[in-house]
């Protein structure tokens, strides 16, 4: 799989991929735990930012910010040479990593995941004091969907057919599973999509209902415990759902 797919995690988290890119990335996601964890982090960040509300911040916020500023040592400006070049990366440094001559040290390569974490923290801080100090919202806890996707033992299976794609992620440790679908048409008011857990004895247990948005996409966390399930299915049922499937599954994915 092309290494370029790793760079699509941010666009995937904010639903900015086209159908071909989404299908390719979801297939890659099935075998890449790093990308699954990164998607979960970025999705949680996007959800948190949408939860910002305009309100009066707590009285302690200003004092806390000012106290924090006093404890942060700003980096000195980059001292370029007469030709505009940056200082050598192997320049001598004093204890603590600062240049011995008081200038700036050479470039430091920060791993991508650390850059991501710091970027998200900066976004959170900026959002918390936006609009002249009138916006205040702490980070919300990860959604149930994000918890499943980010689980340490998460496994994923993807099914694609005629422009429709579904990805099921499940965690035996959590006992939960989640589904992300695209390319499903909207249903009339008297019909709904229903999720099912299938067992080894070919019995099906209802695991919740969902509807797609105008673009044919949806995400949902299945009801019930995934640990005894061997498959996840999707059927079209009457509004309100059915006790047992009344039609053949339009999707059926085996959990291995």
Image (cartoon, grey):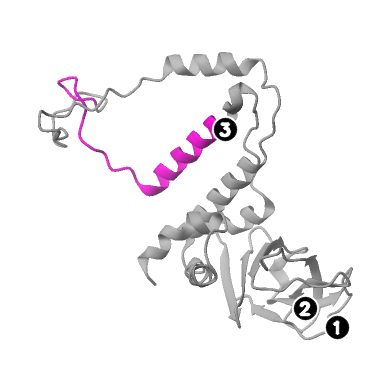
**Residue 163 on the magenta segment:** no
Residue farthest to the left, as pictured: 82
Total label count? 3
- The residue that appears at 65% across and 32% down in the rendered structure is 137
**Mark identifier at residue 181:** none
Q: Nearer the viewer, residue 115 or 96?
A: 115
User: The residue tagged with tag 3: helix, strand or loop?
Assistant: helix
> For mark 2, what is the residue?
235
| Circle nearer the viewer, 2 or 3 | 3
Disc 2 versus disc 1: distance between alpha carbons? 8 Å
Disc 1 versus disc 3: distance between alpha carbons? 48 Å
User: The residue tagged with tag 1: helix, strand or loop?
Assistant: loop
Q: Quadrant of the N terminus?
A: bottom left
The answer to whether 139 appears left or right of 201 in the picture is: left
- The residue that appears at 55% across and 55% down in the rendered structure is 13
Q: Nearer the viewer, residue 6 or 98?
A: 6
- The residue that appears at 70% across and 22% down in the rendered structure is 56
Q: Are marks 2 and 3 in contact (CB under 8 Å)?
A: no
Q: Is residue 137 above or below residue 3?
A: above
Spot occupied by residue 55 in the image (x, y as percentages of width and height)? 71, 26
Q: Is residue 209 above or below residue 141?
A: below
**Mark identifier at residue 127:** 3
| Residues rendered magenta in the picture | 98-127
Q: Residues within 10 Å of mark 1 (few under 14, many from 20)?
A: few
**Which of disc 1 and disc 2 is earlier in sequence?**
2
Spot occupied by residue 256 in the image (x, y as percentages of width and height)? 59, 76
The quarter of the picture where residue 119 lies is top left
Spot occupied by residue 249 in the image (x, y as percentages of width and height)? 74, 82
Spot occupied by residue 50 in the image (x, y as percentages of width and height)? 65, 43
Q: Are marks 2 and 1 in contact (CB under 8 Å)?
A: yes
> For mark 1, what is the residue?
246
**Which of disc 3 and disc 1 is earlier in sequence?**
3
């Amino acid at each position: 799989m092309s290494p370029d797919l790793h760079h699509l995690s941010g666009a995937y988290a904010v639903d900015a991929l086209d159908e071909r890119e989404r299908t390719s990335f979801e297939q890659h996601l099935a075998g890449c735990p790093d990308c699954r964890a990164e998607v979960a982090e970025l999705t949680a960040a996007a959800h948190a930012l949408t939860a910002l509300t305009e309100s009066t911040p707590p009285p302690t916020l200003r004092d806390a910010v000012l106290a924090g500023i006093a404890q942060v040592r700003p980096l000195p400006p980059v001292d370029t040479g007469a030709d505009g070049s940056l200082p050598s990366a192997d320049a001598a440094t004093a204890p603590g990593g600062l240049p011995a001559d008081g200038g700036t040290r050479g470039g430091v390569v920060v791993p991508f995941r650390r850059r991501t974490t710091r970027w998200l923290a900066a976004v959170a801080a900026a959002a918390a004091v936006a609009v002249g100090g009138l916006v205040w919202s702490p980070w919300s806890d990860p959604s149930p969907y994000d918890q499943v996707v980010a689980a340490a033992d998460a496994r994923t299976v993807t099914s694609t057919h005629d422009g429709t794609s579904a990805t099921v992620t499940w965690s035996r440790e959590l006992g939960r599973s989640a589904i992300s679908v695209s390319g499903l048409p909207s249903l009339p008011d008297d019909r709904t999509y229903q999720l099912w857990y299938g067992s080894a004895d070919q019995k099906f247990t209802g695991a919740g209902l969902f509807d797609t948005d105008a673009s044919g996409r949806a995400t949902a966390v299945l009801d019930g415990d995934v640990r005894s399930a061997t498959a996840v299915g999707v059927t079209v049922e009457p509004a309100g759902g059915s006790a047992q499937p009344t039609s053949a599954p339009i999707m059926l994915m085996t959990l291995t």
